[in-house]
Amino acid sequence: MPYSTSTNDSVSDAARGTRQVPASAEERLAPEDLAAWLDERAESLAERWTDAIRDQRSGPRGPMDRVIGDFTLRLVRFLPWMLGPYREMTEPLWIRASELFGSVAARRGLAAGEVIEEFQILRELVIRDLYRDPPLDGTLPLALREILRLNRGIDRGITHASVGHTDAMFFEFFETDREVDRNPDALAREVLDQLGMISDEAEQILEHARAMESAN
């Protein structure tokens, strides 16, 4: 009776089946899913970031300290945009907003290291949430590329916040408009106006890019 190879063939087929999808080809979380996850928790992240910043500082709060809540929310709103197809368009605005954050930190009397510490809080909060409440309930593994891209964006924010702080300290010696210095409320309003212009510009860029995509 000839020897049958059906059993061996079945084993080989099963073995091939376990190897047909290599680990590198495993389905990963899409960038838009991570962006949506960040967008959904933007207000929560901003609120916790604001609380952490205020908890670090003691003493009375001036007008510049009171703009922190606006700053954190608008900065957090940038994070989803840096993960999608519009990141190259919005990153320059993220840099401008980060530099403005550093400039405000100088006006609040913070040292250079302190503004870096405040911005680092954002990274810590995002990482904590990724582990505690991952996107899509953790049903898909995170894509390393997107995590590195997000981390790089926050790194650039930290770097340019430090640049903004340094520039503010430098130009303070050469300012000619002392009226704003004597009126902290006016300066706070000016900062909020600048922040609003940056956010509006980002929205306009995104709206135009989406319209172009739809037209094509």
Image (cartoon, rainbow, N blue to C red):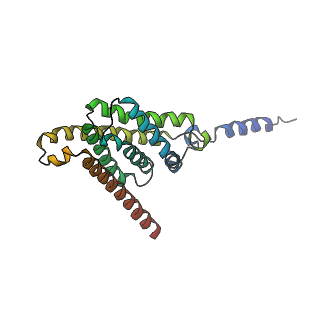
As displayed, is residue 189 above or below residue 6?
A: below
Q: Position of residue 153 (x, y in %)?
A: 38, 42
Please tell me which residue is depicted at 37% across the width and 61% down the height of the picture: 204
Q: Quadrant of the C terminus?
A: bottom left
Say whether residue 164 is left or right of residue 155.
left
Q: Quadrant of residue 199?
A: bottom left
Q: Quadrant of the N terminus?
A: top right
Residue toward you, 3 or 81: 81
Say whether residue 24 is left or right of residue 1.
left
Please tell me which residue is depicted at 76% across the width and 35% down the height of the picture: 8
Residue toward you, 81 or 164: 164
Residue toward you, 178 or 125: 178
Q: Position of residue 163 (x, y in %)?
A: 24, 39
As displayed, is residue 147 above or below residue 39?
A: above
Q: Position of residue 140 (x, y in %)?
A: 59, 42
Q: Would residue 54 be seen by someone viewing this image from the given angle? A: yes
Q: Quadrant of residue 132?
A: top right
Please tell me which residue is depicted at 11% across the width and 47% down the height of the picture: 176
Q: Would residue 145 be seen by someone viewing this image from the given angle? A: no
Residue toward you, 184 or 16: 184
Give the total number of marks visible in the rendering. 0
Q: Position of residue 190 (x, y in %)?
A: 27, 51
Q: Residue furthest right?
A: 1
Say whether residue 136 is left or right of residue 110.
right
Please tell me which residue is depicted at 26% across the width and 31% down the height of the picture: 111
